[in-house]
Image (cartoon, rainbow, N blue to C red):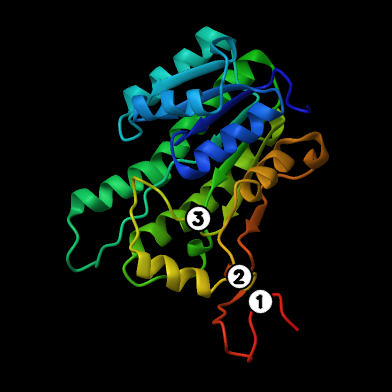
Amino acid sequence: MEFQDKIVVVTGGAGVFGRWIAAHFAREGARLVLSDRRADELQRVVAELALAPDTTLCHATELTETSSILELAAAVKARWGAPDVVVNNAGLYPKFSLLDMDVADWDRIFAVNLRAPFLVSREMAKLMIAAGKPGSIVNISSGASRQMRNGSVPYCTSKTALERLSKGLALELAAHRIRVNVVEPGFAPGSEVSTLSDDYVERMTKRIPLGRTSGPQDAPGAIAYLCSDKASFITGAVLSVDGGNSIGTFETGELGNTPGTA
């Protein structure tokens, strides 16, 4: 129960990873601030995880709007003063050809994947500093930050920029005892915001060296580690939790066997 009564902010709290992250920290005794633009889905998460009203704050945040992010920070301040942990988990993964996509689509991807983590981190860090509280920020990136993908160029670019931003934040916030790190989760289909075809999911899964998609304990465990005292000397780091997908590609049958067999 290392996070007993710690204040943990999770954006994209109603998504696949958001639910898993919330569940992990709830088991550790944390007080949760769940942010997502889908207020009804947030309430579903609260019900599914049986979260208590006195330890949970939900906020319907539109991450493309500065005013909404400021409202989120104000709600955290009014309820608990300042967070201990911030997980910028929300993200968009649309498929677009660069020649066909609208500028509005490009702007929305970067607003959610890059601009919002900057604003959320800035506002939450200000609360931590004002309260004299050391803290931890984890930004959720992707192996796509290092490997360009056809049809996902804006996403890949936004994640590359997010990792550079994270290192910059780590540098500037170190004096305030606020650590900033990055987790690159593995492939986990099922998002209602960024839908993927069955064929795409099958092809992506076959390329993962450890032979499976990301599960409920994988990324959340890594995030919790980076936010814990065990990682008190780690900042500006990038941790891949992706079954080896970022080190290379694997196709079942290439070597005459399948993952996990001799």
x, y percent for residue 209? 62, 73
Q: Earlier in the sequence, mark 1 or mark 2?
A: 2
Q: Residue at x 79, y 38 (%)?
A: 232
Q: Is residue 145 above or below residue 56?
A: below
Q: Which residue is mark 3?
A: 188
Quadrant housing residue 196: bottom left
Residue 85 is left or right of residue 96, and the answer is right
Residue 79 is left or right of residue 157, and the answer is right
Image quarter hosting the N terminus:
top right
Q: Amino acid at mark 1?
A: Pro
Crowdedness of circle 1 by 10 Å Cα count: few (<14), some, many (20+)? some
* Observer-nearest of 163 and 60: 60
* Disc 1/disc 3 C-alpha distance (Å): 18 Å
Is residue 233 visible to the viewer in this orientation of the structure? yes
Q: Residue at x 24, y 66 (%)?
A: 98
Q: Which residue is mark 1?
A: 259
Q: In front: mark 1 or mark 3?
A: 1
x, y percent for residue 192? 35, 45
Answer yes or no: do the residues labelled 1 and 2 have beta carbons within 8 Å?
Answer: yes
Residue 159: numbered disc: none
- Element marked by disc 1: loop
Q: Is residue 220 above or below residue 58?
A: below
Q: Earlier in the sequence, mark 3 or mark 2?
A: 3
Q: Is residue 214 above or below residue 245?
A: above
x, y percent for residue 13? 47, 33
